[in-house]
């Protein structure tokens, strides 16, 4: 499996993933899925130009996007999919209806970053230590700013 924390190291895919990448397109083709839908040509979208085709799938039929009505949607040339996933996960876990207003990715990115920073600061002040067995990482050279330079966000 690919571990995003490992940076740009070589990706290794499990046998299950390799089997799925063969099985799923075949199933979709045999079931007539591609005949019933209009395809999105990802290569023609400006944001995907000059990008490599997926290493596993290669030149396969692309998956289709089903558009829901009255729900905020990511623009096809936007790379904010991570923010959408996080926002929808939050809506689902809190059992909140997804809004139909426009998606403010910059606001949400700052909101989540602030919440993570506050969580980390609270954890550090309380003296919590992680229970995992990972080796400690070397110091990054980052120094904590003086308390008078911090903004309290609540």
Image (spheres, rainbow, N blue to C red):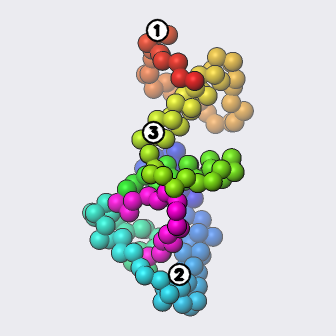
Quadrant of residue 122 in the image? top right
The circle drawn on residue 25 is 2
Q: Is residue 67 magenta?
A: yes
Quadrant of the rendering where the N terminus is positioned: bottom right
Residue appearing at x 53%, y 23% in the figure: 153
Q: Is residue 8 above or below residue 127?
A: below
Q: Is residue 33 above or below residue 139?
A: below
The residue carrying mark 3 is 107
Q: Is residue 84 magenta?
A: no
Question: Could you tell whether 76 is left or right of 3 in the image?
Answer: left
**Inter-mark Cα distance, 3 to 2:** 37 Å
The residue carrying mark 1 is 148
Q: Residues within 10 Å of mark 2 (few under 14, many from 20)?
A: some
Labels 1 & 2 near each other (Cβ < 8 A) = no
Q: Residues within 10 Å of mark 3 (few under 14, many from 20)?
A: few
Image spot of residue 151 (x, y percent):
48, 18
Sooner in the amino-acid sequence: mark 3 or mark 1 = 3
Residue appearing at x 44%, y 58% in the figure: 74
Image spot of residue 38 (x, y percent):
43, 81
Question: Residue lying farthest right?
Answer: 131
Image spot of residue 97 (x, y percent):
63, 54
Image spot of residue 15 (x, y percent):
61, 70
Sooner in the amino-acid sequence: mark 1 or mark 2 = 2
Quadrant of residue 117 in the image? top right
Question: Could you tell whether 91 is left or right of 141 in the image?
Answer: right
Indicate the secondary structure of the residue bearing disc 1: helix
Indicate the secondary structure of the residue bearing disc 2: helix
Question: Could you tell whether 152 is left or right of 48 in the image?
Answer: right
Between 22 and 14, the one nearer to me in the picture = 22
Query: What stretch of residues is rendered in magenta?
Result: 62-77
Is residue 3 visible in this depiction of the protein? Answer: no
């Amino acid at each position: 499996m690919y571990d995003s924390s490992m940076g740009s190291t070589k990706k290794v895919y499990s046998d299950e993933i390799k089997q799925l990448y063969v099985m799923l397109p075949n199933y979709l083709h045999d079931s007539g899925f591609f005949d019933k839908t209009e395809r999105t040509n990802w290569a023609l979208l400006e944001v995907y130009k000059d990008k490599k085709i997926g290493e596993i799938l290669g030149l396969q039929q692309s998956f289709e996007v089903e558009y829901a009505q009255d729900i905020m949607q990511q623009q096809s040339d936007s790379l904010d999919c991570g923010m959408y996933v996080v926002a929808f996960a939050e809506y689902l876990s809190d059992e909140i209806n997804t809004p139909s207003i426009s998606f403010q990715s910059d606001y949400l990115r700052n909101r989540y970053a602030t919440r993570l920073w506050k969580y980390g600061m609270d954890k550090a002040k309380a003296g919590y230590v992680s229970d995992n067995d990972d080796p400690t990482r070397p110091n990054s050279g980052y120094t904590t700013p003086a308390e008078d330079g911090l903004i309290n966000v609540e």
